[in-house]
Image (cartoon, grey):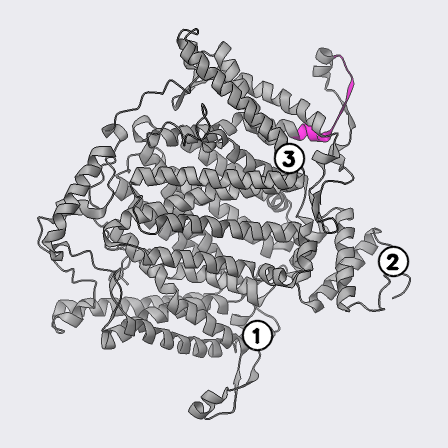
Amino acid sequence: MTELRQRLGREPGGTREPEEKESESENKLDGETASDSESKSEFGGSPPVPTSDDTPEVLNRALSNLSSRWKNWWVRGILTLAMITFFFIIIYLGPMVLMTIVMCVQIKCFHEIITIGYNVYHSYDLPWFRTLSWYFLLCVNYFFYGETVTDYFFTLVQREEPLRILSKYHRFISFALYLTGFCMFVLSLVKKHYRLQFYMFGWTHVTLLIVVTQSHLIIHNLFEGMIWFIVPISCVICNDIMAYMFGFFFGRTPLIKLSPKKTWEGFIGGFFATVLFGLLLSYVMSGYRCFTCPVEFNNDTNSFTVDCEPSELFQLQEYNIPLVLQSVVGWKTVRMYPFQIHSIALSTFASLIGPFGGFFASGFKRAFKIKDFANTIPGHGGIMDRFDCQYLMATFVNVYIASFIRGPNPSKLIQQFLTLRPDQQLHIFNTLKAHLVDKGMLGSLEDA
Amino acid sequence: MPRILDELDLRSDSDVPDVPPPTDSTPEILKRALSGLSARWKNWWIRGILTLAMISVFFLIIYLGSFMLMLLVLSIQVKCYHEIITIGYRVYHSYDLPWFRSLSWYFLLCVNYFFYGETVADYFATFVQRREQLQFLIRYHRFISFALYLTGFCMFVLSLVKKHYRLQFYMFAWTHVTLLITVTQSHLVIQNLFEGMIWFLVPISSVICNDITAYIFGFFFGRTPLIKLSPKKTWEGFIGGFFSTVVFGFIFSYFLAQHQYFVCPVEYNSETNRFMTECEPSELFQMKKYSVPPLLQAVLGWETVNMYPFQMHSIALSTFASLIGPFGGFFASGFKRAFKIKDFADTIPGHGGIMDRFDCQYLMATFVHVYITSFIRGPNPSKLLKQLLILQPEQQLSVYKTLKSHLVEKGILQPSLRG
């Protein structure tokens, strides 16, 4: 959700003086400001104008039939519906289009954050810097896409000779590309602008860390099965909308100083609503193979297929309802997909920890005195504004899948095994054998 | 585009006067000034003695073994991290930010826990297999690390204080970039160490040798400046350092490659509960006859030469150390100029901080790691084994059968008499 700019005109006058003194002493030392109080100089002159075009919560306090505010509300609502419809269309079009969309969103987010960095540091005219930022983005993407392609498209890669070489020396090539960028950065350091250039270098790297790694985790989740992509994202969106609705109707106790419009009622109401939504959505989706099957690359048709025997996560099972709920719900057993239990974990994370991503972004916007990341979506701000809560979610889902759902991929392990030296292969084989014998899996079937 | 405030006039660094290069720790001054000034010679002697002291400590630790080396790498990492974070505090005058020092150390702990967990599980697989609690920690390692990191992240968000948002975000980013540089590289150094101590010693020595020989060549023959960023570096030093480092690396690897202690991968022996380095040396470390190319035959007068294949790799390592390693040094110089500091810290008299000594090593560590994984060995067998052991029993059985049929096919395994 977009946040209001700090209403400096409302701050008590008593706090102004010590801050100004602090800022002066800071300025004397090195021109670097230690606090955000410099904004006084700019805001002091203009009257405090509440920005009315992007903040529906204003409706709470002001009259609710001012036509400009309703118009804004309608704009937001229509754009929300448009984005959700767009989301469904993309899902319908399939994994390849989804991957492309994730890629585009990633590039746009990177662009938005880097542009903010330029604005903060007035560094548009730094030599080379824009080129270098895009170059680093390309390098890191090349590295991650190469790893993904190697993992998931192993047979395709083995078939084509140039791909095979690129894949074998992938890390070396990526590192060499990155080093080239690093050396270009060092060579581009200009005497009067060292600090600025280092700041932008750091800014670029942190942005890459946040934006690019998470988008690749999203793609990994997608390959596990589209349900692992759709349910988390929908839970975060649902939590956003539900928390807003509950806050709108019942909101009373503020949640955190950072985002004054969030309330405890919205938070808790959103939590329960999201868990329920997650349960229902997973129930509906688990019935369809196109959502639950891992995305595979079919060598013969050279396209993505989602066809498989659904794993036991997606097969209906009878669960006994705990006695406590039996009286409430009136059933003794219920038929559910095991995945729905996992969806409770996902929705809980989306409602309880996901908002911290939003608070982080709010803090970031307040720190750099910006209202929105960009103006891409009317009524909503930039792409980054919509995706700030998603980032923690993507990492969580990936870690969750790796830890609880699947272990390592057996076929991938076999492929790695085949590249080892014979003595290493023998050693691993013997250790595995000893382990299986230990566990009693290999009885008198095999020779010791 | 939303309007951004102008309160940070960072268009240039010119608002702060340039600090003149300090005279007490820059021996190149000797070139320009009289060489008989006793204060400067004294400083030169201090630097020299400290250099010898550091090299001796290095040899001592090598003698004490891999475990001590790991501890040393860890201590250096913690110290470098501390130095860089302290610089951040000074730059942003943020000593009194709430929580921030605790949070920085907490993040360091988290990231180290994550990396050590991944490494320990790989290399101590047999040790870990036997202990149930460790099994649990290993299996859910990523989840536990992520949960720990998230706790730190949420603490950071909750600690944001109204007037200090920007500062806190700067320190957060500073911490993360520092972690990225120091912690990941130190773990790569340890991974290289486990490949064989030679993969740890030769790169580090090449960087040190390049430092020293480039300085010596620059001292005696230096004339053309190399880069504006470090006015004391010269092309003569650079090129002279390159050739001497290649020769040094070549000779040094020849000596090291003969001893199993240096050449063998470090393994953890569960019976003796120690690290051991005993193995059949791989073919990299077995003498081979190479034909000398006709060009060099005239110069050297030999037709063939007995070399270890590893020496060819050492040429690649030394070349990187001499040509690209200095960029790490230039990066650190630029960083110090940007933040108007002379040295990272005052830990080592005459040399500055630990980070000053290790700035060139970081790129080297990553390069050696990438080099090993790309050209020397394939996937890590112990990692593969660990993953195999995590699989479900039915999956393990089917993998076992596939592997067995493959090995029998290749003739590596004799077909069993029964079944």
Q: In this rendering, which labeled residue sits more in front, label 3 or label 1?
A: 3
Q: Is mark 3 on a helix, strand or loop?
A: helix
Pinpoint residue B294: horizontal percent, then vertical percent.
73, 16
Name the amino acid, label 2. Answer: Pro
- Between disc 2 and disc 3, the foreground one is 3
- Which image quadrant: the C terminus of chain B? bottom right
B366 lies left or right of B372: left
Circle 3: residue type: Trp
Q: Name the residue under label 2.
A: B415
Residue shown at 30%/52% (left/top)? Answer: A364
Kind of residue at badge 1: Leu
User: Can residue B173 be seen here?
Assistant: yes
- For the residues marked 1 and 2, what is the alpha-carbon distance in whole angstroms? 38 Å
- Could you tell whether B270 is left or right of B158 in the image? right
| Chain for numbered disc 2 | B
Q: Of residues A321 and B86, which is closer to you in this image? A: B86
Other residues around mark 2 within 10 Å, as few (<14) / some (14–19) / many (≥20): some
Q: Is mark 1 on a helix, strand or loop?
A: helix
